[in-house]
Image (tube, grey):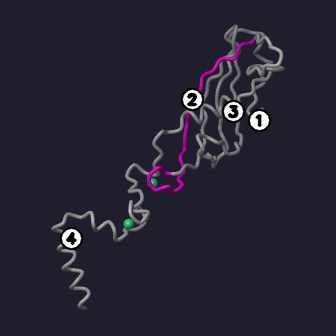
Amino acid sequence: MIFLKIDISRIEKETGAYIDFYIEQNISPLDFQGEKIVFLKPFCVIGKAINVGEFITLRGTIKSAMELHCHRCLERFELCFSTDFNEEFPLNTKVIEGEIQEGIKDHIIDIRNLVENTVLLSLPMKRLCDENCKGLCERCGANLNKEQCSCVTEKIDPRLAVLKQLLQNENDED
Ligand SMILES: [Zn+2]
Ligand SMILES: [Zn+2]
């Protein structure tokens, strides 16, 4: 079973028959809402194909890791994910001329689209490298997770700012 295809010839004649599948597959980067999503590990797709009479039901889990950009600090970070799917494919697809039918063809279910769409739909809306990510300085653009720029001191309580100024002067005199 390669290229995210599942051969169902063993179960398509018998209601109740099923096969377990496990597929490992490298996925090339996907474009999603103007962003290129890069996958750092092969996809692991584990599941069951069950003949339920009129349909083949596919149930399973997709696991991998992707590289995303943090919405606050714009740095890249790795996100491991595990997402479930549950989809039905009609056993008797009437092929309509000139129309691309997604489903079962020559005893094979191609689950590439199912897998890719499931993963993209599971992407978190708010992508943060860390819940406590400090983001970028609004003034100088410094990554505040990595460095503390001098602009930050201006946000300090004015009374503390005076104290800081005094300390600064003291240092300058040395
Ligand atoms: Zn971040
Ligand atoms: Zn700054």
Residue at the extreme left of the image, as rendered: 159
Q: Quadrant of the C terminus?
A: bottom left
Judge whether 98 appears above or below 27 on screen.
above
Residue type of the residue flagged with mark 2: Asp
Crowding near pointer 2: few (<14 within 10 Å), some, many (20+)? Answer: some
Mark 4 element type: helix
**85 and 94: which is toward the camera:** 94
Percent x, y for residue 134? Answer: 38, 57
Kindly report which numbered mark, 2 or 4, lies closer to the viewer in this rendering. Answer: 4
- Residues under labels 1 and 4: Cα distance? 62 Å
Residue 103 magenta:
no
Q: Which residue was labeled with disc 2?
A: 84
Range drawn in magenta: 70-91
Mark 3 element type: strand
Q: Quadrant of the N terminus?
A: top right
Asked if the beta carbon under badge 2 is closer than 8 A to the nearest atom of ligand 1, the reply is no
Kindly report which numbered mark, 3 or 2, lies closer to the viewer in this rendering. Answer: 2
Q: Which residue was labeled with disc 1?
A: 3
Kindly report which numbered mark, 4 or 3, lies closer to the viewer in this rendering. Answer: 4
Q: Which residue was labeled with disc 4?
A: 161
- Quarter residue 169 falls in: bottom left
Kindly report which numbered mark, 1 or 3, lies closer to the viewer in this rendering. Answer: 1
- Residues under labels 3 and 2: Cα distance? 14 Å
- Residues under labels 4 and 3: Cα distance? 61 Å
Q: Which residue was labeled with disc 3?
A: 22
Tell me which numbered mark, 1 or 2, is placed earlier along the sequence: 1
- Residues under labels 1 and 3: Cα distance? 12 Å
Tell me which numbered mark, 4 or 3, is placed earlier along the sequence: 3
Tell me which numbered mark, 3 or 2, is placed earlier along the sequence: 3
Mark 2 element type: strand
Residue type of the residue flagged with mark 1: Phe
**3 and 101: which is toward the camera:** 101
